[in-house]
């Protein structure tokens, strides 16, 4: 028996994960650095191949393929209703939002759009906006960590924990919920939830003021993020960027307003955009500030939903959130694309059905993090190596939907 279990061969890594740039092609003062895939500032299993000239970034190449969620291939072997738990695991920080986008697409396939009770729609928007808050808290908090602000991370994670407990009270799960079902909901809100949620919102409002003072208006934070990673609006549009990354570049577009899905047209909220108040429009500071402002808008939406759920659409003993949930989902043969505004941008699903099966022939996910990641090489060239970390963090990437 051979006693040598494994013999190191230098070419193994090169063959399994080849670099775009080769050593022989570099200038004498340049070097190749590998940032990730387990570096904390890459926000997951992302590897960045960086060519640097001292502290200056010459080129950046994102390397994908370390997570292998295989969402799209799973979805093509499962019935429509059993796909929802897999949708949760794409952007695992905003599972409710992803469920909402997917379920609305299936309901369009079944011609259920606009036919659900308003209480169901308001509950969906309520839990989606709570999850949007939780997602932005992680984005802002971990971004503080990326550039050396530890206290801010602890503060936002403390407040996010309240949201996680509220959502766990509704669903029984902490992060991956399977709560928004095709045609309805898994269950109605627990008795007393509206009152508890109102208490949380009243607690959160002054905390948002503290968050602005601690991070957004902090002189050190401004110096690290203003005029860094500037993304012009035209470039953002050409690369398909969406969400806070696009709005940070000054374009006032939000699918909750543009498409007007669910009950969003009945709610009053604004669309924050980057204005270059501390630097240049589209820099890292603008992208982060847009997320903080969106938290304020989500609070406004949650308050309006709570008013509706305790007045015009309050709980009754006859209300059954599963009344319109189909026993078998077998849509007609068609191609359909649907989309929704997730915390990170436009999450879209392309469905292809054959009219015979309850399993989609094709289910393609349009992931916002993939497009937002693709812009990093364009806005990083010529930046300092330390600023590259700030640029990556400002994109708020979740690798579950990139390597799907």
Image: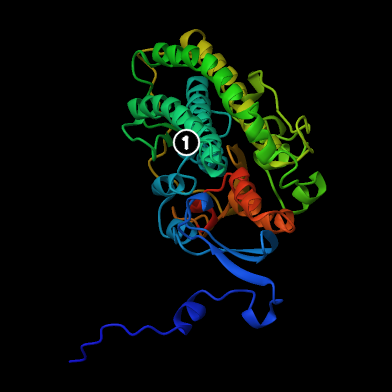
* Quadrant the N terminus occupies: bottom left
Which percent across, then down, holds residue 42?
Answer: 53, 53
The residue to which callout 1 is attached is 96
- Image vertical order of residue 353 relative to residue 115, above or below: below
Which percent across, then down, holds residue 248?
Answer: 72, 37
Visible in this render: residue 187? Answer: no
Q: In this view of the protein, which residue sits in the foreground, 334 or 178? A: 178
Mark 1, Cα crowd under 10 Å, few <14 / some 14-19 / many 20+, is many
Q: Position of 223 compared to 334: left or right?
A: right
- Image vertical order of residue 85 relative to residue 132, above or below: below
View extreme (top): residue: 311
- Identify the residue at image location x=78%, y=33%: 276
Name the quadrant containing residue 147: top right
Which percent across, then down, holds residue 167?
Answer: 39, 28
Name the quadrant containing residue 162: top left
Q: In this view of the protein, which residue sits in the foreground, 66 or 116? A: 66
View extreme (bottom): residue: 1
- Identify the residue at image location x=45%, y=44%: 92
- Image vertical order of residue 262 relative to residue 106, above or below: above
Visible in this render: residue 208? Answer: yes
Q: Position of 219 compared to 143: left or right?
A: right
The residue tagged with tag 1: helix, strand or loop?
helix
View extreme (right): residue: 234
Q: In this view of the protein, which residue sits in the foreground, 103 or 209? A: 209
Which percent across, then down, holds residue 205?
Answer: 54, 15
- Identify the residue at image location x=44%, y=52%: 358
Name the quadrant containing residue 62: bottom right
């Amino acid at each position: 028996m051979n006693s040598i279990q494994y013999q190191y061969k230098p070419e193994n890594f090169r063959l399994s994960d080849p670099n775009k740039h080769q050593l022989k092609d570099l200038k004498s003062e340049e070097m190749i650095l590998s940032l990730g895939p387990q570096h904390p500032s890459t926000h997951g299993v992302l590897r960045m191949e960086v060519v640097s000239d001292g502290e200056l970034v010459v080129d950046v190449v994102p390397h994908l393929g370390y997570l292998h969620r295989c969402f799209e291939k799973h979805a093509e072997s499962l019935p429509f209703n059993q796909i929802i738990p897999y949708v949760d695991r794409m952007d695992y920080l905003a599972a409710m939002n992803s469920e909402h986008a997917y379920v609305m697409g299936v309901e369009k396939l079944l011609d259920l759009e606009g036919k659900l009770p308003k209480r169901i729609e308001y509950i969906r928007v309520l839990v989606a906006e709570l999850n949007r808050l939780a997602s932005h808290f992680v984005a802002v908090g971990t971004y503080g960590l990326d550039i050396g602000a530890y206290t801010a991370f602890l503060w936002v994670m403390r407040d996010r924990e309240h949201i996680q407990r509220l959502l766990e009270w509704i669903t029984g799960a902490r992060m991956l919920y399977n709560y928004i079902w095709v045609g309805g909901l898994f269950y109605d809100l627990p008795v007393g939830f509206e009152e508890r949620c109102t208490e949380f919102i009243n607690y959160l409002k002054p905390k948002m003021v503290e968050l602005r003072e601690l991070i957004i208006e902090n002189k050190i934070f401004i110096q690290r993020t203003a005029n860094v990673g500037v993304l012009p609006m035209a470039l953002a549009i050409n690369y398909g960027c969406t969400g806070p990354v696009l709005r940070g570049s000054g374009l006032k577009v939000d699918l909750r307003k543009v498409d007007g899905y669910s009950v969003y047209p009945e709610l009053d909220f604004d669309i924050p955009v980057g204005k270059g108040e501390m630097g240049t429009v589209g820099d890292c500071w603008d992208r982060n500030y847009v997320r903080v402002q969106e938290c304020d808008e989500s609070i406004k939406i949650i308050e309006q939903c709570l008013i509706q759920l305790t007045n015009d659409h309050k709980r009754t003993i006859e209300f059954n959130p599963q009344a319109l949930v189909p026993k078998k989902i077998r849509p007609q043969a068609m191609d359909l694309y649907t989309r929704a505004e997730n915390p990170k941008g436009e999450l879209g699903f392309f469905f292809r059905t054959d009219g015979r099966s309850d399993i989609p022939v094709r289910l393609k996910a349009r992931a916002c993090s993939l497009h937002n990641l693709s812009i990093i090489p364009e806005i990083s060239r010529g930046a300092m190596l330390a600023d590259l970390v700030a640029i990556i963090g400002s994109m708020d990437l979740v690798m579950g939907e990139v390597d799907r």
